[in-house]
Amino acid sequence: MRSRRSLVSVPGTVSWAARPAAAAASRVTSVQVVTASPQETERLAARLAARLQPGDVVAVSGDLGSGKTTFVRGAARALGVREPVSSPTFTIGHRYEAPVPVAHLDLYRLAGIDPEEWADLEPYFDGTIAFVEWPEHGGEWLPATRAGVTLTHVDEKRRQVSIESGDDLGL
Ligand code: ADP
Ligand code: MG
């Protein structure tokens, strides 16, 4: 059985345990933007993407249809992903090749994570920049996040997008 602790000590992987929980909880970056189109949401995501580095995990929360996958698509494109970025609803995730590989997970169907499931999920976080839809379904297994994005319906075309981070992302 693989434990979280052993994963953290694997050479070459990024240690999320090293990040202080207190910093993750504080909100040094707190940006609220109302976007008026999917393209605007994608452009905002591209701005965040420019601030990310290998090992970063971004939690992307919000109701169905709020624009989570749209946001991830914009970020992935900005990070150099060329193939179409679609919702991984019928698989747990996609891993896209790019200068820094991009992982896109959707945990909607997970009721909870046990060590076996984590063993399937863990490679998605290895050396990637990872975006996780429905992060709340990952519980404590999810690595510490660099940023949290929350999307909320305003009306048919507008979404409130909130980006928060314990780091100053310069957004
Ligand atoms: P989720 O992954 O949260 O279920 P998707 O990104 O798959 O959501 O779908 C969002 C839908 O809302 C898409 O059809 C998109 O075109 C539409 N949409 C309309 N306005 C916006 C906006 N401002 N930002 C993002 N998506 C929008
Ligand atoms: Mg989605």
Image (cartoon, rainbow, N blue to C red):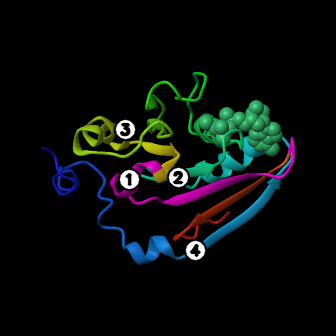
Q: Residue at x 29, y 42 (%)?
A: 118
Earlier sequence position, callout 2 versus callout 3: 2
Q: Is residue 42 above or below residue 52?
A: above
Residue reaching furthest front?
A: 111
Q: Which residue is mark 2?
A: 59
- Asked if disc 2 and disc 3 are in contact, CB closer than 8 Å, the reply is no
Distance from label 2 to label 3 (Cα)? Answer: 14 Å
Q: Where are the magenta residues, as a range? A: 137-157
The answer as to whether callout 4 falls within 8 Å of ligand 1 is no
Q: Residue at x 57, y 21 (%)?
A: 83
Earlier sequence position, callout 2 versus callout 4: 4
The answer as to whether callout 3 falls within 8 Å of ligand 2 is no
Amino acid of disc 3: Tyr
Verify whether residue 169 appears in magenta: no
Asked if residue 90 lies left or right of residue 35, the reply is left
Earlier sequence position, callout 3 versus callout 1: 3
Distance from label 2 to label 4 (Cα)? Answer: 14 Å
Give the structural element (helix, strand or loop) at label 2.
Answer: strand
